[in-house]
Image: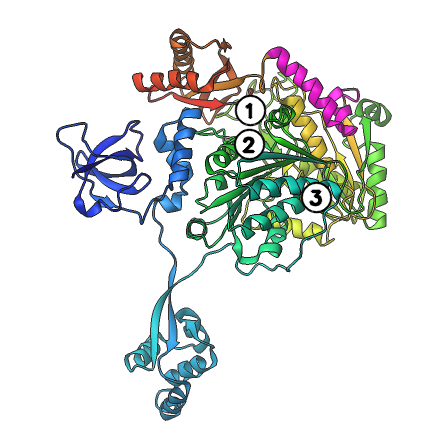
């Protein structure tokens, strides 16, 4: 009986093609298997979508090659891919790209090396060694080393230690004294990393109650989503660790998601100290070879615990039973730059449902969507209201910066209270964290004549001055001006230009001016460019070699420094006025998370919030650590405007080099969709995106507010299939975006 396969190609062709399955491939041709097929006069790679008994067309070409041993995309992941394509309105070939790392798609090979072993007994080798020592000293040296090793040695190490040539080893192999095998080398990012074994800690009453709920779900093999809402330092991680232990006892695999910036050596070491070699790590700083090896270790079941950033949710874990999303509110779980614009938290819940797994979402500041789901009993809620061990919540102080400016008779970056606090900690040998979510030295170079700031010529954004490089830099495209212009590029007036705004680089310089001899570490995108730099800076601070840590959002969470007793948030209201419905939620979360770094040890912590809006409800509620009241207030606003969680939002963005063509195509698309949609939706007007121009591309967007995402996505899919998009204009669909502005 003849068999046929629908194959989806890696190319932009947005429909499956049909091929016959040659008899020799019958056993291996399954959905998810990677294949090579003829198309016109070339060969293309793709994946089998389905296998069927009948051909749709009278004459079809055969599959040329089977490229993978078994399904690269396993049946559970294949089912997830189909859902991703429908929900996020994305062609299937684009979904497959995020399911498999590039190194796996390109079939980068396992790293292999030669391994030299003894072929004769030790006694025989000793006799032969003495016999040839005078005539062939190099061969004798090789044998001496081979007599010392326990079993064998890598050829590269043998040559390095013996200082001999390869020919000496080859001669001994040809004479049957040695043998050489090819071995696979594991390019694990954990090799050579130090760690110490630890045991499970005793849970307090609240932790135990939350853990027992999770344990019950695991033992019943049932899908259930648990929201663990615990204050910072309440011991959520210990619950995760003990839940993973339970999963291992039941031979179940675990995926643990953490935000990329929290995936530090400190986090990894904590899990490795409990589970040793059972862990695989996946994040963006791995080399392609490391990622290839980790992925295949997971697929073979050698690493039943996967810890990683958002893309780790697609790991091919056999017998998956537990999925954990730490800091579930984090916006970095959302992919926004390219389709599918998925949220790893939502994908985690869907994957849990499909695989009958237990899902844990953890946060000190849950997203409104997750907390709402818990309030209507869609999720199981567990609250941790106190810090673990003896630590207490830090004291919070709101400082009105308008009054500080009056006292200072001008602008100042530091309130008197913050300066006093840093001085006290410095003298007492304690540590301070200063948070400012702006990198660079000055944020703007302003013309005093025309009042225009110097903007990037490729993007609609002001350029930031970096003192270390003596350059203006665009933080969107990387374009730089070195040195900065002395004359205004806009009006060309000779009036001196003026620097405005504050970044982390300037804060660090100010701290050294205020406190000579103080030791600082700065962590932002400029100081963490290189592999390992993030870990190195954190190690410097955690070992007590620095007194103050200054940083952007990357220091806001996932870090545990017992000696930090003061946290200063220098400008906690900077994003409150953005025209984005999530602005208040984001500010509340950021204040709470940064504040949570203080007082995690034996000494009480203190947090100083500097703001120009001291009476703002969001800031006051964050300072009072009152999430429930904030949730109720924010939920009422969302309901009044029919924003999530009471509806779904779809943001459609258009980008192109020609401003008029991009705008026209956006208007045409919106009109077509409105005419062909039967759904009751609210169609927002087309506006320039928050960044109206990025890398030479003009950007327009509009929002659709609807109840049924799937129904609207069917209309979007119909548009995609019936319209050849303009080559110069790209359209991106983002379901439930984290920002409606940018």
* Residue 640 counted in the magenta span: yes
> Dividing the image into 4 quarters, which one contains the C terminus?
top right
* Disc 1 to disc 2, C-alpha distance: 9 Å
**Picture coordinates of residue 526, whole percent (x, y):** 59, 41
Q: Is residue 537 above or below residue 112?
A: above
Taking depth in this image into account, of 539 and 365 the one nearest to the observer is: 365
* Disc 3 to disc 2, C-alpha distance: 45 Å
Taking depth in this image into account, of 276 and 309 the one nearest to the observer is: 276
Q: Is residue 557 left or right of residue 13?
A: right
Task: Identify residue for label 2.
Answer: 475
Q: Quadrant of residue 439?
A: top right
Task: Identify residue for label 1.
Answer: 461
Q: Mark 3 or mark 2, which has the lower sequence index?
A: 3
Would you call the spot at circle 3 few (<14 residues within 10 Å), some (14-19), or many (20 or more)? few
Q: Is residue 362 left or right of residue 397?
A: left
Q: Is residue 571 above or below residue 287?
A: above
């Amino acid at each position: 009986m003849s068999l046929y396969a629908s194959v989806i190609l890696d190319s932009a062709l947005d429909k499956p093609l049909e091929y016959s399955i040659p008899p020799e491939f019958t056993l291996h041709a399954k959905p998810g298997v990677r294949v090579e097929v003829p198309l016109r006069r070339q060969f293309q790679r793709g994946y089998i979508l389905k296998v069927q008994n009948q051909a749709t067309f009278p004459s079809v070409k055969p599959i040329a090659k089977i490229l993978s041993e078994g399904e690269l995309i396993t049946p559970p992941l294949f089912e997830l891919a189909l859902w991703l394509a429908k929900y996020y309105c994305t062609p299937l070939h684009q979904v497959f790209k995020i399911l498999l790392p590039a190194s796996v798609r390109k079939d980068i090979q396992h790293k292999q090396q030669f391994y030299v072993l003894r072929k004769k007994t030790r006694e025989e080798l000793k006799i032969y060694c003495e016999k040839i020592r005078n005539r062939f000293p190099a061969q004798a040296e090789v044998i001496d080393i081979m007599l010392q090793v326990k079993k064998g040695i890598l050829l590269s190490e043998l040559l390095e230690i013996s200082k001999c040539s390869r020919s000496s080893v080859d001669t001994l192999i040809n004479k049957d004294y040695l043998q050489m095998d090819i071995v696979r080398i594991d390019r694990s990012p954990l090799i050579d990393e130090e760690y110490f074994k630890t045991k499970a800690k005793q849970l307090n009453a609240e932790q135990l109650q939350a853990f027992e709920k999770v344990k019950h779900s695991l033992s019943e093999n049932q899908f259930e989503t648990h929201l663990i809402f615990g204050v910072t330092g309440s011991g959520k991680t210990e619950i995760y660790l003990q839940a993973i232990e339970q999963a291992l006892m039941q031979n179940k695999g675990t995926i643990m998601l953490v935000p990329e910036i929290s995936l530090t050596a400190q986090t990894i070491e904590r899990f490795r100290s409990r589970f040793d070699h059972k862990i695989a790590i996946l994040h963006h700083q791995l080399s392609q070879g490391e990622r290839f090896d980790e992925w295949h270790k997971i697929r073979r079941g050698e690493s039943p615990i996967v810890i990683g950033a958002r893309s780790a949710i697609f790991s091919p874990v056999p017998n998956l039973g537990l999925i954990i999303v730490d800091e579930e509110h984090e916006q970095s779980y959302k992919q926004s730059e390219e389709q599918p614009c998925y949220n790893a938290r939502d994908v985690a819940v869907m994957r849990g449902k499909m695989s009958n797994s237990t899902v844990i979402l953890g946060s000190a500041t849950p997203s409104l969507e997750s907390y709402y789901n818990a309030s209507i009993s869609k999720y199981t809620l567990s609250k941790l209201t106190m810090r673990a061990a003896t630590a207490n919540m830090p004291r919070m102080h709101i400082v009105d910066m308008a009054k500080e400016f009056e006292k200072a008779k001008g602008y100042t970056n530091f309130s008197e209270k913050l300066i006093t606090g840093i001085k006290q900690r410095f003298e007492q040998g304690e540590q301070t964290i200063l948070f400012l979510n702006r990198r660079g030295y000055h944020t703007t170079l302003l013309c005093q004549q025309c009042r225009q700031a110097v903007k990037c010529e490729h993007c609609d954004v002001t350029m930031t001055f970096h003192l270390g490089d003596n350059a203006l830099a665009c933080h969107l495209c990387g374009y730089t001006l070195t040195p900065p212009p002395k004359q205004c590029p806009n009006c060309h007036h000779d009036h001196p230009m003026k620097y405005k705004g504050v970044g982390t680089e300037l804060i660090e310089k100010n701290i050294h001016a205020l406190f000579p001899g103080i030791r600082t570490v700065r962590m932002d995108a400029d100081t963490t460019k290189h592999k390992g730099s993030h870990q190195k800076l954190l190690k410097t601070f955690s070992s007590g070699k620095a007194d103050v840590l200054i940083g952007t959002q990357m220091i806001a969470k996932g870090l545990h420094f017992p000696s930090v007793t003061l946290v200063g948030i220098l400008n906690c209201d900077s994003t409150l006025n953005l025209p984005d419905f999530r602005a208040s939620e984001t500010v509340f979360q950021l204040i709470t998370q940064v504040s949570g770094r203080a007082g995690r040890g034996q000494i009480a912590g203190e947090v100083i919030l500097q703001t120009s809006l001291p009476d703002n409800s969001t800031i006051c509620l964050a300072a009072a650590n009152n999430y429930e009241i904030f949730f109720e207030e924010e939920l009422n606003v969302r309901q009044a405007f029919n924003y999530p969680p009471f509806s779904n939002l779809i943001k459609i963005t258009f980008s192109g080099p020609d401003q008029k063509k991009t705008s026209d195509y956006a208007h045409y698309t919106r009109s077509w969709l409105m005419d062909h949609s039967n759904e009751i939706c609210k169609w927002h007007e087309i506006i320039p995106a928050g960044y109206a121009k990025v890398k030479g591309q003009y950007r327009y967007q509009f929002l659709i507010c609807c109840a049924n995402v799937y129904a609207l996505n069917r209309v979007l899919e119909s548009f995609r299939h019936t319209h050849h998009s303009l080559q110069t204009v790209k359209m991106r669909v983002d379901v439930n975006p984290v920002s409606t502005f940018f």
